[in-house]
Amino acid sequence: MFLLALCFSDSKLQNSGEMFFLQLIHFITVLSLVKLEENCENRSCHPVIGDLLLGRSKQLSASSTCGLDGPQKYCIISYLEDDQKCFHCDSRGSYDPYDNPSSHLIENVITTFEPEWKNKWWQSENGVDHVSVRLDLETLFQFSHLVLTFKTFRPSAMLVERSRDFGKTWKVFKYFAHNCDTAFPGIPKGHADEVGDVICDTRYSDIEPSTEGEVVLKALDPSFLIEDPYDPYIQDLITITNLRINFTKLHTLGDAISNEWQDEIEEKYYYAIYEMIVRGNCFCNGHARQCVPLQNMQADVASYPEMVHGRCVCQHNTDGVNCEKCKEFYNDTPWAPAVAFNDNACRKCNCNGHSEKCHFDMAVYLANNRASGGVCEDCQDNTMGNQCELCKPYFYRNPVHDVADPYACIPCDCDENGSQGNGLCQSQTNHRTGTLAGACLCKENVEGIRCDQCKSGYFGLSANDPLGCQYCNCNPFGSLKFSVCDTVTGECQCQQFATGRYCEECIPGYWGLGNSLHSCTPCNCDIGGARSDLCSQSNGQCDCRPNMNGRHCNQPKPGYYIIPLDYYFYEAENALLLAKPENIVSSTPIPKCKDYFEKQGIDFRFENGRIILTNMTKQSLTERTYIKEIFPFSTNGFAEVVLRQPTPRSDITWTGPGFARVLNGAGLRFTVNNIPYPMEFVIAIRYEPEILEDWTARIVVNSPKGEASEHCRNSKPLDGRDSLLLSATSRLALLNTSVCLTPETEYSVDVYLTQESNSDSNSYILIDSLGLIPQINSIKKLCNQAELDEYDKYNCIEMASEIGTEILPNVCERLIVSMSARIHNGAVKCSCNIDGSLSPICSKFGGHCNCKPNVAGRCCDRCAVGSFGFDSDGCKECNCDTKGSVSPLCDQVTGQCVCRGEIHGRQCDSCLPGYYGFPNCQPCQCNGNSEICDLVTGACLDCKGFTNGTNCERCQNNYYGNPVLGQSCRPCMCPDSPNSNRYFAHSCHQDPDSAEMVCSCLSGYTGNNCEACPPGFYGNMEEFGGRCLPCQCNNNIDVTNPESCDKVTGECLECLYNTYGANCESCLPGYFGSPLLQNCRKCICNPVGTNVENCSVYEEIGECVCNKTTGQCPCLPNVIGTNCDKCASGYWGMSNGNGCQPCDCYLNNSFGIQCNQFTGQCLCKPKHTGKKCNECEENHFGDAKYQCLPCKCNLEGTIRPMCDKVTGSCICRPGVTGRYCDQCAPKFQQQFPECPQCHMCFEPWDSEVTSLSEAIHGLIRLAANIGPKRPSQLGCDIQMSILQNKLSIIENAFKSPIISPQKYSQVKSYYDTIRQKVRKVLISDVEPFSKIPRLNKTISIVEKEVNDLFKELERIKKIKEGETTIKRKVFIAAFDKISEHYSTSVLAGEKLRNATRTTQAVTKTRKHILTILDNQEAKHKQNAEMLKKMKSLDISKMNEMVCGAVWDFPCDIAPCGGALCRDKSGKRKCGGPNCNGALPLAKDALKTANDTDLKLRNLSVHFLEAEKQINSIRYLAEDTKMKASQLDKKLSKAMNRLEADKMRAKELIKNVKDFLLDATISPEDIENVVNQILAIKLPAAPYDLIDMLSKIKKYCDSYQENKKSLQNQLEEVTKLNQRAKEARNLAETLPNTDEIWNTLKMAEDSQKKTSSVLKSINNDLQDIRNKLLEAKSQADLTEDRMEVINDLYTQLETKIAELQDKMLKNRNSAAKAENEAKAALQEAIESEKNLNNLKQKYAFLKEKLKKKEIPPEILERLQQLKKQAEDLSKEIDNKFQSISDLEQKIDELNKTNQEKANQLKGLENQAIKLKNDIVHVETTYSTC
């Protein structure tokens, strides 16, 4: 708004009149603006702009002023004399126009429009570059612009700076420099890009003007639009407290200030300023229109009425020097500058008359949605708040008085003990939150109007308690439901089993308060596994004994186990033998084991649980030992060790390696020294009776001498008077009387065994072990009477002592675990043997380790019976061969089995050396030539006397004789012995007719004794060391021709396949190739392309010879090909006999470098033609090297060629003209394209017109010459046009390719001369027209020279045309020659193609023939292989399976006979003693069935065991039933409790909902109820609840499953019980059941063996069938595969003959196999008869057993045996059918072989024919 005033106020005028006028305008404008801004209401207002220097002369300073210390000389730049241009400066006083006009202080720059303002100025010292002028303002002002008017030159470089912090920091406004790059490097020049950019300006630093030059600086560039003037960035630019102008460089006009002239030069250069104007105004942020002086202002304000003052007279309720804040108590809105029509006035605070001070708070302002931000201070009348609208604490709003009333707030009336803050109340009523003014603020646990009573569930109101009352803190799980504590003492009412003031803990023996919805839970600590019945209150963990685990201490830790009830059992095998009492007299036999092994010469010992078997000496066989009272089992006595080997899928009913077999009346002594705890024990004995008789055991416990222990002092000793019945129907016996034993004492327990009936004094009983069973009732405080009753009810002792019982009733298992943990003080560490066990972890109950294979024992520390070699891999099975060993047991250290005679090996599985045929080992049959043979087949090994064969029955190769007849083998003399260097035979044989030796010579030798060389070999056999060697002719001779090579020297005489030389090692002259590959081919060199000079010509051939190896002919230059028959790429023209010449095709214009081989024509691209593609094609012109352009000639108006190849000018036919020959010419009618000639009268007139035209042009030229001399170019233009046309013609002529370079240079020089002359003519504008005749003369000379030039060109053209004609003739002749040769070549090519087709057909035929021969060879190989396999076929294995012996022996000595064998009476012989074939085994089946009755006797024992198992199952079922009943009761209780809890929860939820919906209830009460609800604790964690639910579900599921299984078990038990009773009744009436059972078992084993043998026979027959099928398939494949090589043809006939011999032998073998199969069939028929007899006997036995009422189980087993026998019969029938099928297939195979032999004969004939054809074809092609 001040722009107009600024413009006029800042201008400097030249005269006073103008100055006065502008001052008047300035005054009027300012007055109008002031009037406009007098009213600041509802808008912004601003003070007027003025000169900030007025009145501030004291605040203006300069760093350098002349004459401050005295007069100083200075000069001006002028041509005047020194006295006229030099002056003095004296600034020691202020300027006075009269008294001190030479003073030039800085204050002189403040002119204020003085009329004589040029009379004073400020001036710096001479020669000082760096000078600064500084203005210091008293406050912040708004700066507008700066104007400096200089008296001298303006500075060469300067800058202006500003400060907003009173000179502490400075920022540059702008740089000014004459040369910015030098003065201020790095500062950008030119115009600013954005407002505030600091740049360097060059406009105000020039030398001119020399005086009154101005420097103008504006704070804001007017070219930029300022959107927000109060932006901090803009305010930083326009507000200042200090301004500094720095002059940095003087203008010296090129003078160099040196030492010599320094003073004189410096006097001329200094800074001098006439006037300095700093425009600005008081900065008031738009809230003031005028300003006043500051209080500390030192200037004379009255002297300068127009002075710009610094303190704003603020409007809009603002305050401050710059109106930068709101007035006191006007802080309800934030301060902001006024902008345009928005005054942003400050608003008065609202304190409701209770305060007179406030401040602004932005957080409050934003919280009130920018409506009010004032915060009142020092509120009175008991008020507070931002607007003093609230009452202070302990006061509340009086509802009858206004908020501005002094009595608006009155005191609270609350109990100090129960209210917050000792009496706080609600300050005002709030209907939204439901609060009432004056209501007391109770403490958290206090209620009531005055807060004077405790809430329900709290007690003890106290002022010192921050919550008012203490929480009862009754544990909700331990206290009674809906009960409260005493309001005075806080005592809670506890549930059952809970105790404590808060009911927070359980009584001893209970735990888990708070872990469930119910109260305390019993600890239920295990009575033996825990040290006491107390447990942890938090988790219920009992105090466990060592190595016990689990909450109840009823589980062992990992790696530990609970010692079972049957732990203290002592093996009878380790006991000592007690002699029989004296009143029993009987023989003392040797124990059976020892007796059995001693008969075999083996010493049997059982030491440390191991079986030791060693060979005995003769002395040891006769040794005997006298009977002693106590002796170990390894000596003679009344007991022996019976070892029992476990069998797969059978229960183990004993412990340890086996039993002690004790004689009637003898006894055993057991040593006991590992008693763990002083208590009573029950003695148990495990045994097995051998007969159904009861035994009695008399037991004596021998204690050490001395007093008995305190614990056992009153117990009764066992002295033998107590006897124990060993029932025949049981396996375990328990003594009713217990015995008291103590730890750390060694006892001996003697057991005397006698038979009740005394019927057999030599009867035995098998004793397994003796056990000590802890008596549970002897342990104090272990269990109650109810538990003892359950213990006895379930027969826990009997069940735990039985072998194999793994599952015990829960009662038994629990009590046994407790008792074991008590007496052993916890669990025992697993003792698993590292080597024998799979893991160090054992079973938790019993400590049984997981053993490795064949390892036994609780700790896996010994090998099981029937195994040996205990190591880290376990034990290995003995695997003693049942046929070769006398026992399945072996030495448990070495694994050596006990072998039968003539058998050896660790497993007794092979014959002794010199024997074979395991297990029926027989001596080797080797005709006296060997002592050893194959252990299986009996084939002799290491034959001596030059013999070989299965029985050493024939001579070795190169020897002859008959070892079978006793003849020795003699060497073959062919011609010398086999060990000499002159043995040249494969072998020899003795002619059966002449008895002479006949040699089978090696290849290369012939004669009866191989003493001569055959054809194809040479050598002198008469010389010493003479040999026959093959003729070295590289396979290029006919080896069947005796004359093909020299017999003595080996020189090749008749070479084949175009070869020659002593070894046929070279191709014939004129041939090339490899003689070694028989492919020498004739050279074919093209005579046209062959270089005769480099040829090797043989006189025999008379033509050029190629390279012998590659066939390459010597070629002429640029000729290639093996035969020199084609040009190289890029060459052509081989027919001239000098090689090929280059095509020279232009690559840019052709499709490659290759051209036609005969014509040389290149293959041109479009638009190009010519032989080398170096010309443009028809209707195109230009330089073909670069580009061919279309001529565009009209086809109807041109003749051929259509256009000029160089210029592109169209060649028009007569009567046509124009650039493109597209219009009719003069003298012709304009009827294109016909263009008929004009009438004959047209020509005379045309001639006349032409002559007249020329005359007129002549007159015109004459007039031009005689006319006035004035500037004219008409004549020159005509001449120049003519010359230019001629020059164009010359240029076109120069482009012709027929000009030689020399001529071209000559023409070019002429052309340059003409151009120079033309240039001279072109200056005709300046030259006078008088020179035109001279120009005409020059033109005539040029025309003459051009004519001469054309004559020369015509002559050259004729020469070129002559040369072209000669070349054309030569080319035509060459082309005719080429065409002739081409025709010849085409015919030759046709012949060649025909020959090639013939050759290809021949090659194809030859390949086909070779394929047929190859297939024939393959067929031969297949037939040979097939015959070899057929020859190897024999039925000896099948014979062995059927009859039981190897078939290789003759029938008279074969122990088991065989197929086709008959005895002396003529009957078939198959089977015999010790023969294990199918037939002998079938014969033994009847005997096995008769023995079945013996096996049945032992069934009663198994039935009794089954009855015992049924009893165990019944106990388990009862236990399960009891558990299910208990579970059912628990679930019923849980369901009832759950229903009750559910109802209570529903009732609670309903009460809570009604309470919350009640409008009369206070929020405090609601909050208390909510807190109590949230305080209810569910189970400690979610997984506890889930676990509880899963347990309930498991119980329900197990109950259902147990219920079903219980019903099934009950039904099964009922059935088993019924069947057991029936079986028992039947068994009692059945005598000798043991024998029946043994017989059945033996029959079953025999049946199994028979079945396995038949299966083996079946497998062998299947193998035979597969081999036959394979042979048949291979024979079928021979039809499609024939492969024979040409050079092996001579051997084909011999091989076919051998094949026929083998075929005959094979046919004989097949016939023999057929006879053997028939014999096997007959034997099978006899086996079937025997089987029928067996069936009859079986039926007889069945009838006999029916009368004796056999139990159903035995009948069922007999039915199974019958069914298996019938299946065996059917299987034998199937084998018979298979043998019949085999015979039929053998016959078919014989027929097939005969057919194949016939086919081979035909193939032989075909191969001979093919060979002859091949030889004929090769001969024909080799000579063609």
Image (cartoon, grey):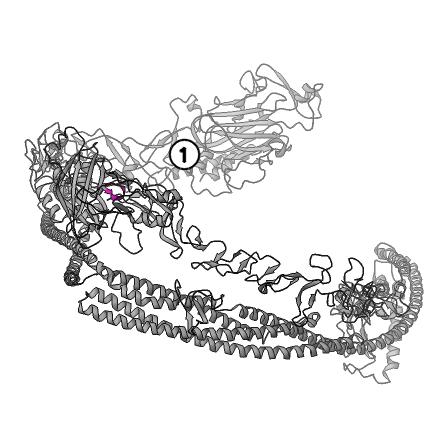
Q: Is residue 1574 visible?
A: no
**Drawn side of residue 623 relative to residue 1130, left or right:** left
Please indicate whether residue 593 sits to the left or right of residue 1607 in the image.
Answer: right
Is residue 1600 depicted above or below 1039 in this figure? above
- Image quarter hosting the N terminus: top left
> Label 1 crowding class (10 Å Cα cut-off): few <14, some 14-19, many 20+?
many
What kind of residue is marked 1?
A: Pro
- Whether the magenta-drawn stretch holds residue 789 is answered as no
Q: Residue at x 47, y 71 (%)?
A: 1665
Q: Give how far across and how far down residue 882 sits, in percent.
A: 38, 56
Q: Position of residue 834 (x, y in %)?
A: 35, 41
The quarter of the picture where residue 1521 lies is bottom left
Residue stretch rendered in magenta on the structure:
570-590
Vertically, is 194 above or below 1312? Answer: above
Secondary element under disc 1, as helix, strand or loop, is loop
In percent of width and height, residue 475 lies at 12, 38
Q: Is residue 685 above or below residue 1123?
A: above
Residue 584 is a magenta residue: yes
Residue beneath disc 1: 47
Q: Nearer the viewer, residue 1161 or 1003?
A: 1003
Establish if 1201 lies above or below 630.
below
Task: Assign the magenta stretch its main secondary structure.
Answer: loop
